[in-house]
Image: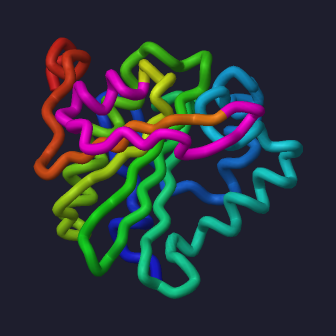
Amino acid sequence: MTTAFEASILPTRRLHLEPLTEDHAAKMFDGRQDPVAYRHIPENPPGSLEELTARYRRLEPRRSPDGEEAWLNWALIDPNGEPHGYLQATVQLASKEAWIAYFVFPSSQRRGYASEALYALLPALRDAYGIQRFNAEIDTRNVASIRLVESLGFVLVEHVKNADEFKGSTSDEFHYALAGLPRCPPQCRSNGQ
């Protein structure tokens, strides 16, 4: 069962975090096509618009089949209706923990969209679900993502060797955690947030 929070749009200074639906697929498809954006994640660009539409449709219930996790996804949409990426949060409802992930289109990177969106989302998740710990698992080669979570106050809790194998190589991961609320990263301080 979708809650009011899960169906609501979260505004930030420059974005609307819209609950992802199959209707977003056409708007998001082109931004998800650059293979460079997938170099640090075990995923490839969607093969077709139909494939992406079907994936988003499967995510619309916002719950795992057993109902124990909230599977939440938001499209990052600016006031002109342009997409810039998406956020994901997997909430373990019993333990009050959430795992976050984000994907910013290459054309929108290095503009502070991910930090702005996460700075708004994490307190909202805490309020909606009583989250006590946020987690992020990041390929050790993904320097930009590491800097992002550290700017929000996440701390390194584990270095996992050979965590995954994809695209012909083995990946190590850093596991980060945040027990409180995120701190305002430099971009939001300079933008008056």
Q: In this view, does 48 lie above or below 39?
A: below
In the rendered image, residue 184 lying in the magenta stretch gets the answer: no
Q: In this orientation, does residue 119 appear?
A: yes
Relative placement, left or right, of 126 versus 175 is left
Q: In this view, does 163 lie above or below 115?
A: below
One can see residue 81 in this view: no
Give the residue displayed 33% in from the left and 26% down from the top.
Answer: 148
Left-right relation of 41 to 126: right
Q: Answer whether residue 159 is magenta in the image.
A: yes
Q: Position of residue 20 (x, y in %)?
A: 56, 55
Q: Nearer the viewer, residue 91 or 55?
A: 91
Q: Position of residue 177 (x, y in %)?
A: 25, 47
| Nearer-the-camera pick, 139 or 188 | 139
Q: Which of 48 and 168 is in front in this view?
A: 168
Does residue 189 lie above or below 175 as drawn? above
Q: In this view, does 169 lie above or below 42?
A: above
Question: How is the protein colored in the picture?
Answer: rainbow
* Residue 47 relative to residue 150: left or right: right
Hey, which residue is sitting farthest front in the picture?
A: 161
Quadrant into which the C terminus falls: top left
Please provide percent x and percent y for residue 104. 53, 29
Q: Which of 90 and 175 is in front in this view?
A: 175
Q: Which of the 4 image quarters holds residue 27?
A: top right
Q: Give the range drawn in magenta.
A: 145-169
The mark tally for this picture is: 0
Identify the residue shown where x is 60% and y is 26%: 105
50 relative to 43 in the view: left or right: right
Q: Which residue is drawn at 46% across and 28% down?
A: 140
Based on the displayed image, in which of its 4 quarters is residue 55 positioned? bottom right
Identified at 40% across, 49% down, the residue is: 100
Q: In which quarter of the image is residue 137?
A: top left
